[in-house]
Image (cartoon, rainbow, N blue to C red):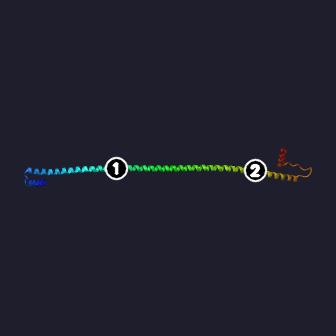
């Protein structure tokens, strides 16, 4: 404050004494020194602010790096969980498909065995039925032949003329076959 007072006094003295050079030079010098001191204080304060700003930037950079690393770790963990879920789902689907395939194969084998068994039974039954039908047809044919023979002989006897002039009839098929059977026995 004494400098300020001296500066004010010097400025006032300069105004009264305009023609003296030494006095004006000292007021300018005092003003310059005051400005220089203010600039030095301002420079020191700005350097201090820069240092604090650098500290804050460093802290924020560290915090940002920690957050980024935490985010990367969390993203990596989420990717691993998603991959595990996909693998588990794929594994579950594969096991389900294998189980369904095995079940389908077993059902197909059972069905194939059943079809074969039914075919064998059907073939056996059809063979037995065919044999029964053949036997029935043979019996019917034998009955029919016997019936025709008995009817044919009766008709021949009734159709034959009595006497010596009767025309000789050719023997019928049944009569020939009967004669052949008797000849063979």
- Which residue is found at the position 62% from the left and 49% from the top? 113
Residue 76 place in picture, x, y as percent: 40, 49
Instruction: Say which element carries label 2.
Output: helix
- Which residue is found at the position 58% from the left and 49% from the top? 106
Instruction: Say which element carries label 1.
Output: helix
Q: Is residue 149 left or right of residue 165?
A: left
Q: Nearer the viewer, mark 2 or mark 1?
A: 1
For the view shown, which residue lies furthest in the top direction? Answer: 184
For the view shown, which residue lies furthest in the right direction? Answer: 164
Q: Which mark is residue 66?
A: 1
Q: Is residue 79 left or right of residue 26?
A: right
- Which residue is found at the position 34% from the left and 49% from the top? 66
N-terminal of the pair, mark 2 or mark 1, is: 1
In this figure, which residue is indicated by the disc labeled 2?
135
Q: Is residue 148 left or right of residue 22?
A: right
Q: Are marks 2 and 1 in contact (CB under 8 Å)?
A: no
């Amino acid at each position: 404050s004494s400098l300020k007072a001296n500066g004010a006094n010097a400025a006032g003295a300069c105004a009264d004494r305009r023609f003296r050079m030494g006095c004006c030079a000292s007021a300018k010098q005092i003003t310059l020194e005051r400005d220089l001191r203010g600039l030095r204080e301002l420079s020191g304060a700005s350097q201090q602010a820069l240092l604090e700003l650098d500290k804050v930037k460093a802290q924020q950079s560290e915090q940002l790096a920690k957050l980024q690393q935490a985010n990367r770790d969390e993203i990596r963990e989420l990717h691993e969980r998603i991959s595990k879920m996909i693998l588990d789902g794929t594994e579950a689907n594969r096991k389900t498909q294998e189980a369904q395939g095995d079940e389908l194969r077993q059902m197909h084998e059972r069905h194939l065995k059943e079809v074969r068994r039914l075919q064998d039974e059907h073939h056996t039954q059809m063979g037995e039925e065919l044999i029964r039908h053949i036997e029935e047809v043979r019996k019917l044919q034998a009955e029919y032949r016997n019936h025709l023979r008995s009817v044919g002989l009766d008709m021949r006897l009734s159709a034959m003329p009595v006497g010596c002039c009767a025309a000789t009839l050719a023997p019928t098929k049944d009569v020939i076959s009967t004669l052949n059977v008797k000849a063979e026995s």
